[in-house]
Image: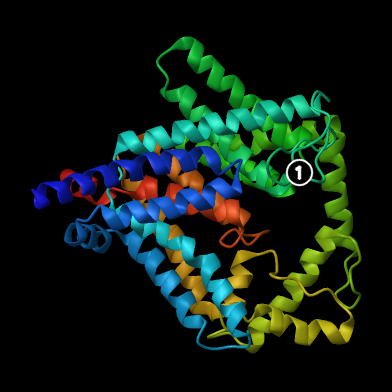
Amino acid sequence: MMSWSRERIQKEARRAAGWTTTALGFTIPMWVVADGILVVLLVACWLASGEWRERARRVAASPVALSALLLFGWLLAGSLWGLGSLDERMLAVKKYADLLLIPLLISMAIDAHERNRALLVLGTSLVVTLVLSLLLGLGVPPTGWIIGCDSSNPCVFKKHTTHNVLMAFGTLLFSVMAWKSRDQWVRWGWGLASLLAAGNVLLMVHGRTGYVVLAGLAILAFYVTLGWRGILAAIVALSVSFSAAYQVSPSFHERVSLAVASATLWNPKVAVVEDPVGWRLEFYYHTVEIIQDHPLLGVGTGGFVQAYRERAQQAGMTVPPHPHNQYLFIMAQVGVVGLGLLLWLFVQQWRSASLAGDETYGLLAKGLVVTIAVGCLFNPFLVDHTEKLFYCLFSGLMCSGSDSQLETKA
């Protein structure tokens, strides 16, 4: 009786874990508090659902799971050296701990039904976000959902950078939903959502990172569809689209012009005042200097602020919590080994997507890698709450079961 009860508890916990991942697909674009609750619930379900020997085998057989564990392990080891206080080191490790969701989900062997359900719910959440953003852009709601968003910059639930990155991925997701749909009206609905999402990114919301992510995803989609000829087609399509957006959208025109002007006028010897692009260039410049002084091991996980402060205070410059570039941030903290482990994780995800059977599934899996890899050039996406949780959750979902698929093919 006790054995039956334990098996029943494990079965129900595993089932609850699948529904928790589905719920996270809905809350990630919208609600930070719910994200935290659901992650705790997911870990509790994982602990209660047993099958430890089989889970260890799945993790050992998954290059993506092992790569995520190696990256987090190196970041954890980095907290043992460097300049940061104990609180700074522990906070930094805590921020990177979501990387463990990747092997956790892979160990649970999330099946195709659960994965597709989570993707559908994510798409629904992004459609809700898109509709509210379009309404806000038309002036229907009186205010935005966060400070700084209004009809001229209609982001909702998240700041404009996060909004545009998620909506850029939504453009690809909606296209895939249209591609896979058998119902004509549903197909047209998802196709319209994809076009509106691209327009929302380019013409309405101010997140410049989203512009670049959308371009990267367009190149990926053309390449997957048309092969190497698709690269040329993508360049032509993007040139036409971005040129049109530059002429038609005051928002896009202003953001691009300001970025070009800031990059042109930036001087590394002069402190930047109220200029996001100039600040980024300033942060990059001084972070590279930190890396040059500590190339192998870095200044330790959590040691970036202290290392940057030593350089910035004398010049009267702003001290950032991070350099707005995940690659530089990793190198500054844990050296070239850390950067190599991050890139290796992306490579393993790309390979796993290529080896998966379904073409549309592989496109989405690669699209996730492109979204985060491109976004990390301009933001620390492995420590920003929404982006890192989005990346870690769907990395675990999309790579779960890939080892068993490969064994079946063999």
175 sits to left or right of 47: right
Residue nearest the observer in this picture, 169 or 388: 388
93 sits to left or right of 142: left
Quadrant of residue 128 in the image? top right
Mark 1 crowdedness (10 Å alpha carbons): few <14, some 14-19, many ≥20: some
Q: Which residue matches tag 1?
A: 146
Q: Residue at image x 34%, y 45%? A: 17
Q: Residue at image x 54%, y 89%? A: 81
Q: Secondary structure at mark 1?
A: loop
Position in image of residue 145 (x %, y %): 74, 39
Position in image of residue 241 (x %, y %): 72, 32
Position in image of residue 281 (x %, y %): 78, 67
Residue nearest the observer in this picture, 361 or 153: 153
Q: Is residue 30 in view from this perspective?
A: yes
Position in image of residue 331 (x %, y %): 58, 76
User: What residue type is disc 1 on?
Assistant: Ile
Residue at the extreme left: 1
Q: Residue at image x 58%, y 49%? A: 33
Quadrant of residue 381 in the image? bottom right
